[in-house]
Structures are given as C-alpha cells and as structure tokens.
Amino acid sequence: MYAVETQNLIKRYGKTHALKGLDFTVNPKEIMVLLGPNGSGKTTLLLILATILKPTSGTAKVMGLDVAKQPTKIRQILGISFQEARGFWRHKPAEILHFHAAICGVPKSERDAKIEEIMKGLELWDARNKLFMHLSGGQTKRLEVSKLLIQRPRFAIFDEPSSQVDLRGKRKIWGEIHKLRDEGSTILVATNEVREAEYLADRVTVLDQGKSVVCDTVRNLKDKIAGGDVVELLLEPGPNNTEELREELNKIEGTVNLVASGENQYRAHVSIAEAWVPKMTSLCYERKARLLSVRVTEPSLDDVFLHFTGKALETTTNA
Amino acid sequence: MHDIIRLVWFDLKHELRPPIWIIMEWITFTIQLGIYGALISQLVTGISNYQQFYAIGFIVMMTFGVGSHTGRHFVEHAHEGRLPYLLSLPISRSKLFLSIALQGGIELALMISVPLAITLALIGNFTFISVIGAIATLFILGFGVAGLMLGLSFIAFKSTDIYTAITVGLSSIIIRFSTVLYPLMFLPPSYAPIALLSPLTYGADLVRLLLGFDPNILLDPIYAVAVLTALAVSTLGLGMLLLQRLVEGVKSA
C-alpha cells in the first residue's frame, strides 16, 4: 500500500485549474520531493492531502484514508509545516510549540524536554520568549518546522522547509527531516530549490502546470537526460592521440556528442557517465593514449526540470 | 473537550493579559448609564423607569457587539493566516466551531458581568430564577448573533469589502430598528413591523420581562423564546455546516 496515492486529482479555483488530473504516489517511509515552480500545483496538492482544501474531483488517500471521507482521521496522523509561518502575533514561540504539542497529543511528561531539544537544535531557544511578531523571517520558518519535529507525525508535509533560512540553518533542518524519515515517517516536501531537493529526496516528482511530468530517484532522473553528463578529457600529447581516436571515442555507446575543446582536450556529452568512463579508459589503454585528467559533471535538477518541461526552474518567477 | 478548552484558552489568554478592552467596556457602560441614562430618563415620560429600561437595552447591544466580534474574529483568523493552521490540527471541524462559539460565550460572560450586576443593583427587585433566565436569554441571543455573523463571514472569503459593508450596515439596522432603546408600542406604525424582524427586539423584551418590566409594553415571551431559540439553532447550525463543507483555508488566507 502506498502512503499517499492520488488518482485523477483535479482542483479548480473558479476558472483556474491548479491540479489537472494528478496521479501521484508516495511510498511508506520515503522522502518524496515535489519540484516545480510556483503555480505548478505543489502547495494545492499538499493542502488537499492535509485536508485543508477539498479536491474538485478525483481521489486522494493518505495511509489508505480518503481525504474527503475521513479527514479527521487523516489529521490525527499528519502534520504540516506551512510555506509561511501562520501567525499568532502576540504569542511566544515556546507557548506556540507547547500548544501544538498538546493538541497533537505529545504526552505532557515529554513536552518540555522535546521542545527544548528541538528549539536548541534549530537555534530558536534564545528567542523562545520573544513575541512571534518580533521574530525574523528565518526564525518564524524554523518555528514552523519545529512544530512537526516535536509532533513527529507518521506523515509529515513540509512546504519549502528552509526558505528564508541561512545555509547553516538549512543543513540543520534537512538533517532533522532525514532523522524523521529514519524513524519511520513518510515525508512529502515541496520546494523549488534544487539544492534542497537534491539533498533531501529519495524520489522526486516534477510538477508542472498541475500535472506530474516525471517521478524517479534523483540519480535516475539525471540519467534520463540523454547527453546530460559532461566528461572532459585531457590526453597526453603523443602520436596515439589522433583524429581516429576521437572518432572511436565518439562511437562509444552513450555518447551524444564529443568535440575537441582544446589541444589534446575533448568534451563529451554522454548519457550515463558511470558507464561511459570505463569504456573510454579501456579504449585509451588499448590505443596507448595516456589520460592526464578526467572530469565528470552531472546535470543538476534544474537541468532535469528544463529537460522534461522545457522551462528553467530557478529562473521562473517563484513566490 | 480538552482540545476545545485548549483552543479557546490559547487565543483568549492574550486578550485577557491585560483585560483592558473588557474594563473599557465596563467603564463605557457605567458612564453611559450614569450620565446619559440618568439624563435621558428625566426626558422620557412614557416609561417610569427608563434608566433601567435603557440599561438592559445597552447590555443587549453589548451582547450583539460580542456576537458580531466572534464572526469578525473568524474572518481575522482567515486573513491573518491562522485558519489553515487551525484547519490542519487533529480535531474535527465541529470541535473547531465549538471552540469559536465557546470563546464568544466566555467573552460575552466577561463583558456583561459587571454591567449586569450594576443593572440588577439598579432594578433591585428580582429573583434568582429571573436572573438566570435573563443571562440565558443573553447567551442565546449572543450565540444567535455569533452564528449569523459566522454565516456572513463566509462572504469575506470572496470579498472583505462586501463583508464589512454588509455587517456594518446590518448592525446599524438591527440595533436601530429594534426595541433595544424604546418599546415596540411606542414605535411609529411604519417602524414597528421592521422591529419585529430584528433578533434584538426579542432578546431585549424577554430580558426586560424576566427582570420585572411591565409586560404590557413588551412582546409575548413565548414568541420571544421561540424566535431566539430558532435563531440560535439555525444560524449556528448553518455556520457549522458551512465550516464543515465550504471552508478552505488557503483561499481565505
């Protein structure tokens, strides 16, 4: 059984179609990252799964429970960290977390210790008695994430968990999300940050205009781009480094393009560098051409997004 | 029940620390009754104890104000982004709705406690049962108004401007075209039928009857009880139904 499953899920806001027949699954105990620019339907999907929005049509199930028919049961196993921290302006972080922990059923005996541990871990402890309205953007985001880390739900949803947070904070949040997954939670993360997706994802679903374009592991997605890996070769000058060798390199399976990029230098666009490089080294060995250096560059998830949607992810107007 | 109390207290405690707005309401009531009520009662000749009549009318207006505030509070939840969070919590929509209603009820109890005590001291002649009856009437009226405003608050998800215009306009009509400040029998024939459409008419007249005012200038109490109960049940029921069926946090945020 999938932890999350949607079938032909449609959500309309008036004439706007946010989700256009989305089929989507998440396996138990995995981190699924939804990658897409704003307006791609990520947040809408998260809010439907969190039973905050109602689907226009289609089905969505969380741990086998239907979002339309059993919303209260779903909310008992689910937690959501919103894209923007939802303000109780005159409350303090510590009391917000105490309230959240209590209402989510964290035993009273464990609350204080858990809250202290998570607040210290995310460097919020010193701000625990500040008013919410006086927190910085990064602090409100950490507070939002802290709610789930204290709750530790079976199914955790993070909407852009590290936006507005500095790099050090990002790494702490990502580490905590991994820890949550390792403890057995199923995690769904929506982001338009490539680095976040690469760091977190067990699998990635690329969403564009309310539809799932492709879903796979990061590795497989990158490998699906023909010529996505770039291998740069530097050969020792010598008699064996000939035009014939260049042609033979070009014929290696998986080579999309190979050009001379300088004297004794070649740049090859290949599909799967891990498979191509051993064949290339064997060939050079056979032809007695000595390799001085090999540099492999793999495509980023932005390239993956570009490949599958024809659009650049990080240059799209994201909000 | 624990969850409902937690939700209510989480929000309410900040309104009570310090409870300035409640104290200001008490001071307003005291000044209004002590100065305006005392002076106007000398000018009004048709009712022997107009200051007391006015005091009850003012409490009914306060009740209406708290009820309206509950509806507006819900809209604020939506516009400040708290509603999606509340909707994501592991509680049923019914419990969430009850917590909103209960918070309104507690605010009402706090708000009218001192004004009612002053009014009872002014009237002097009452029984324990009549006081309980008057308080119950005010609560039913408060829930009815809160339900009405909660029902209307769903308009705010489409347009805040329309919601504000409707509630402000409705509030002035409901108060002015009612028996809050003057008995039905004194109203001109063109106004009287309209006053019968205002829920405040039934609330004010029933409280006055319970606290010993002349029944001849008031509405039939059975009629008043029936209208107030129907109002509270129907508007709260409608509000709960709307919350369960229609509320979508993000659209409102």
Image: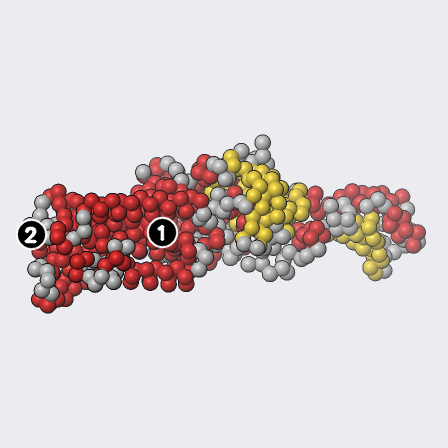
Asked if the residue under mark 1 is in contact with the one under mark 2, i.e. CB atoms within 8 Å, the reply is: no
N-terminal of the pair, mark 2 or mark 1, is 2
Q: Position of residue A258 (x, y in %)?
A: 84, 54
Q: Residues within 10 Å of mark 1 (few under 14, many from 20)?
A: many
Which disc, if any, is residue B124? 2
Per the model, the C-alpha gap separating discs 2 and 1 is: 36 Å
From this view, report whether residue B92 is shown above or below residue B26: above
Q: Is any part of residue A206 visible from this angle?
A: yes
Is residue B152 shown left or right of residue A234? left
Task: Please state which of residues A123 and A285 is positioned toward the viewer in this rendering.
Answer: A123
Kindly indicate whether the residues beneath marks 2 and 1 are on one polypeptide chain.
yes
Q: How crowded is mark 2: few (under 14 residues within 10 Å), some or many (20 or more)?
A: few
What amino acid does circle 2 point to? Gly
Q: Residue at 33% of width from left, 52% of height from top? A: B148
From this view, report whether residue A140 is shown above or below residue A216: below
Is residue B65 shown left or right of residue A219? left
Determine the chain carrying the residue at label 1: B
Q: Residue at 11% of width from left, 43% of height from top? A: B128
Which residue of the protein is positioned furthest toward the top in this rendering?
A1
Label 2 sits on a secondary structure element that is: loop
Which residue of the protein is positioned furthest toward the front in this rendering?
B189
Structure colour scheme: secondary structure
Q: Position of residue B111 (x, y in %)?
A: 22, 54
